[in-house]
Image (cartoon, rainbow, N blue to C red):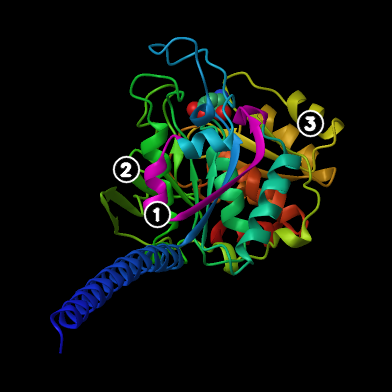
Amino acid sequence: MTKKRMLFIVLGLLLLINAGCSGSNESRNETKARAKTETASVKTAQGNDRLPNIRILATGGTIAGANQSKTSTTNYKAGAVGIDTLIEAVPEMKDIANISGEQVANIGSQNMTNKTLLKLSKRAAKLLASDDVDGIVVTHGTDTLEETAYFLNLVLKSDKPVVVVGSMRPSTAIGADGPANLYNAVKVAASKEAYGKGTMVVLNDRIAAARYVTKTHTTAPDTFKSEEMGYLGNIADGIYFHNDITKKHTKDTDFNISKINQLPQVDIIYGYQNDGRYLFDAAIKAGAKGIIYAGSGNGSVSDEAKKGAVAAVKKGAAVVRSTRTGSGVVTPNPDLEKENILASNSLNPQKARILLMLALTKTDDPKKIQSYFEEY
Ligand code: GLU
């Protein structure tokens, strides 16, 4: 072999080795890069697959409220911010659930009507029936939140978690409670333990049953209380359920939102010293099919109010005594029962109204209506 030929062979070998090396480097890098992308996409896909799908139905309220001033927590505009902004404000929700949202309404909940309530409930029912939805969060003004929550609790036919949430400080305020409440609501809606608990209300790190919770304070963030009957659980990073609700709800009620397209007029009359029968007469004249009397104490009815109540029953309306005290059971009163004036059990007047509307979609039999008040 000539020196020249040997040199060529060595050069060729070096080139080959080099080419081989760079080639394998390239492919290793490519493989690594591809692996990285694949891992990423697999991870994302698995992550998404593993996370529950939670749909947020937004209806307005302070949680979507905005104020010019960061320090004022009154006189703001409720329902000023849309669902996308609400979701963007709490990106951490995306670590615990696949979040999607839709705007059902954007109102202060004092303006919640039967029509909007039906629309919201029907939408929730449709979503719950879908395999793509694992739970629902409803954002809502706090003023009538308990009424909507109790309605959903009675008409939705699903075990999937439904959580109603609000806030007491507008989204623009220092110390706004909306983001933490919303995050917690999603956390509860996304949890397996929340299945079959009925509609829940989540604010201030507490999980309450829609049946028992009520708003107790005009402005304080810890306004929602369920003290007499207790909370279902609390949230301290993790979710801790302590109790179950004994009253019938969701799948165990006689009411199915898919069959309800209209609700009868049910009015509430407040009991007070010197009250009279004329508000009963006025309610019946205005088309009421049911009347809740928010009586004093254990649902006491004044003699004058009783005249109005008896006349209303004679006109075919259902009359139910509740209490203005804020807690306790309104027990049956034999004298009033004789007149078919019913008792609300432990439902406050605003929730007794919700149940009576639903009851009247099924029956006008006082005994049957009374049984609903015992069971639900
Ligand atoms: N009145 C308004 C509402 O119920 C604001 C109260 C609130 O959300 O805290 O929507």
Residue carrying label 1 = 188
Residue lying at 86% horizontally and 31% vertically, measured from the top left: 285
Residue type highlighted by circle 1: Val
Q: Name the residue located 84 percent from the left edge and 31 percent from the top edge.
A: 286
Asked if disc 2 is less than 8 Å from ligand 1, the answer is: no
Q: Mark 2 to mark 1: distance in Å?
A: 11 Å
State which region is magenta.
Answer: 89-111
Residue 100, image x and y in percent? 55, 50
Q: Is 192 placed above or below 77 here?
A: below
In-front residue for pair 4/251: 4
Mark 2 / mark 3, whichever is N-terminal: 2
Q: What amino acid type should be assigned to the residue bearing mark 2?
A: Asp
Left or right side of 12 for 186: right
Task: Give the residue displayed 54% in from the left and 38% down from the top.
Answer: 145
Residue 226 horizontal/vertical position (percent): 38, 44
**Where residue 259 appears, x then y in whole percent?**
78, 61
**Label 3 Cα crowd, 10 Å radius (few <14 / some 14-19 / many 20+):** some
- First along the sequence among labels 3 and 1: 1
Going by the numbered disc 3, the residue's amino acid type is: Ala
Q: In the image, is residue 215 part of the stretch drawn in magenta?
A: no
**Residue under the image location 24 percent in, 73 percent down:** 15
The local secondary structure at tag 1 comes to helix
Q: Nearer the viewer, mark 3 or mark 1?
A: 1
Q: Which mark is residue 205?
A: 2
Report the quarter where the N terminus lies.
bottom left
Q: In this rendered view, identify the residue nearer to me: 371 or 264.
A: 264
| Res 81 quadrant in image | top right
